[in-house]
Amino acid sequence: MLVQLVHIKVLPGQRDAFIKAFRLNCDGTRREPGNIRFDLLCDPEDENSFHVYEVFRDDAALDTHRQTDHFRRCIALIDPMMETRRSKTFYTPVLVEDRA
């Protein structure tokens, strides 16, 4: 299992457009056979700061995800909305519920 947390900071005034564009990626990713979980979270203290909590079966599933049309379309739409570059951190599951 592979866990990734992505931080996204959007420009002021871009929040709603970002969520709308990112929904395409969420909907498509959740249908991928190698995806276990894919959630968009918003910082309650900064409405323009988001985290994406991603869980994939393995590296191959994440690689496949990055090649999908919905991922590529989403990135093309949201990149101009970014205040800073996306940052990614990978985690090793320790005590997690595995429903796969």
Image (tube, grey):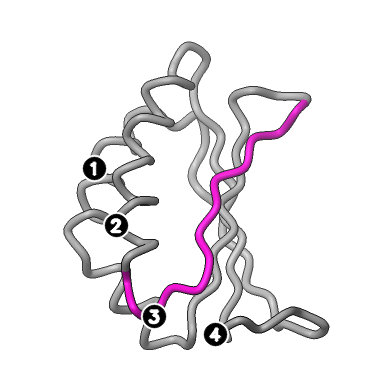
SS label for mark 4: loop
Relative depth, front residue between 87 and 22:
22
Location of residue 16 (image quadrant): top left
- Counting residues from the start of the chain, the first of labels 4 and 1 encountered is 1
**Which labelled disc corresponds to residue 37?**
none
Q: Nearer the viewer, mark 3 or mark 4?
A: 4
Within 10 angstroms of label 1, few (less than 14), some, or many (20 or more) residues? few
69 sits to left or right of 20: left
* Amino acid at pointer 3: Gly
Front residue of 64 and 10:
64
Is residue 91 placed above or below 46 in the rendered structure? below
Cα distance between the residues tagged 3 and 4 = 10 Å
SS at mark 3 in the image: loop
On the rendered image, what quadrant is the N terminus found in? bottom right
The residue that label 4 is drawn on is 100
Q: Main secondary structure of the magenta part?
A: strand
Tag 2, which secondary structure? helix
Residue type at numbered disc 1: Ala
Residue 35 magenta: yes
| Disc number placed over residue 76 in the picture, else none | 1
Image quarter in which the C terminus is found: bottom right
In primary-sequence order, the first of circles 2 and 3 is 2
| Label 3 sits on residue | 34
Residues at marks 2 and 4, CA–CA distance in whole angstroms: 18 Å
Residue that sits furthest to the left in the current view: 69
Between marks 2 and 1, how big is the CA–CA gap? 15 Å
